[in-house]
């Protein structure tokens, strides 16, 4: 987590359990609950059926019982030709179906002109990828907030990159995420995750994380 240190972030202030979750993710079990906006649920169901499950990517759970048995995590370290770690693939599947929900490449990146590194997540797709840059902030009690806020092109946020006819195109999209990680009473580590389209909430997820070791 120290690779995110900068003027607005100091990893030493994080709750040790939150830091351990990000540094030893495969050693944690994840339970998840979901809630969809009634207005946007039909669009989510259509995307999941026609796209997400076919490409095994961004296949968001549509119903609470879809995640009743929890989620499995696998981590694959990505190294360059010199053996240095440049990122990590985080593969998440639903139990007991084994259906992929997210398959992302996680790393730290400093955007041009930014003083603070961001959490960079790339989700590969058929002819390109979705890239999300999340701004890390320490909250009260050593909690962690990761956010892709509104802003200009080149700032933290969500982008779609498409490769077509030998050329690459990139566009910023009005999809915003907020993750709030905190330690609840009785030592339980939890995350509140909200996805929004502009200012309208689309989906809310709640995670409960427990050490497996």
Image (cartoon, rainbow, N blue to C red):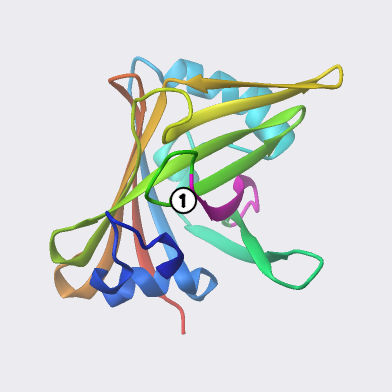
> 1 and 103: which one is in front?
1
Seen from this angle, which residue lies furthest right? 165
50 versus 6 height, above or below: above
Quadrant into which the N terminus falls: bottom left
Q: Is residue 11 visible?
A: yes
Query: Number of callouts in the render?
Result: 1
Which residue is pictured at 62% across the width and 61% down the height?
Answer: 88
User: Which residue has dot 1 on it?
Assistant: 119
Which residue is pictured at 48% across the width and 21% down the height?
Answer: 173
46 versus 28 height, above or below: above
> 42 and 55: which one is in front?
55
**Residue 121 drawn at (x, y percent):** 54, 46
Question: Splitting the image into 4 quarters, where does residue 86 fall?
Answer: bottom right
Seen from this angle, which residue lies furthest front? 113
**Residue 26 drawn at (x, y percent):** 54, 71
In the drawing, does residue 56 fall left or right of residue 211? right
**Residue 23 drawn at (x, y percent):** 47, 72
In the drawing, does residue 169 fall left or right of residue 90? right
Question: Splitting the image into 4 quarters, where does residue 144 fall?
Answer: bottom left
150 versus 26 height, above or below: above
Which residue is pictured at 73% across the width and 34% down the height?
Answer: 55
For label 1, the SS is: strand
In the drawing, does residue 34 fall left or right of residue 45? left
**Residue 90 drawn at (x, y percent):** 59, 57
Secondary structure predominantly adopted by residues drawn in magenta? strand
Q: Is residue 181 visible?
A: no
Q: Which residues are magenta?
A: 96-110
Which residue is pictured at 37% across the width and 65% down the height?
Answer: 209
Question: Splitting the image into 4 quarters, where does residue 36 fall?
Answer: top left
Whether residue 112 appears in magenta in the rendering, the answer is no
């Amino acid at each position: 987590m120290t690779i995110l240190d900068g003027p607005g972030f100091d990893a030493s202030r994080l709750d040790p359990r939150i830091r351990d979750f990000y540094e030893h993710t495969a050693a944690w079990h994840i339970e998840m609950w979901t809630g969809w906006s009634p207005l946007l649920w039909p669009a989510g169901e259509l995307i999941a059926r026609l796209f997400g499950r076919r490409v095994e990517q961004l296949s968001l759970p549509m119903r609470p019982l879809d995640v009743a048995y929890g989620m499995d995590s696998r981590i694959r370290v990505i190294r360059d030709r010199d053996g240095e770690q440049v990122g990590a693939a985080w593969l998440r599947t639903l139990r007991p179906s084994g259906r992929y929900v997210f398959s992302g490449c996680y790393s730290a990146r400093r955007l041009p002109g930014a003083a603070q590194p961001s959490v960079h997540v790339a989700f590969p797709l058929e002819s390109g990828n979705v890239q999300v840059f999340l701004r890390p902030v320490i909250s009260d009690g050593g909690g962690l907030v990761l956010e892709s806020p509104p802003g200009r092109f080149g700032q933290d946020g969500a982008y779609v990159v498409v490769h077509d006819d030998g050329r690459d195109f990139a566009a910023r999209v009005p999809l915003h995420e907020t993750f709030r990680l905190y330690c609840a009473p009785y030592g339980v580590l939890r995350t509140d995750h909200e996805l929004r389209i502009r200012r309208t909430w689309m989906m809310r997820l709640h995670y409960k994380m427990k050490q497996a070791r």
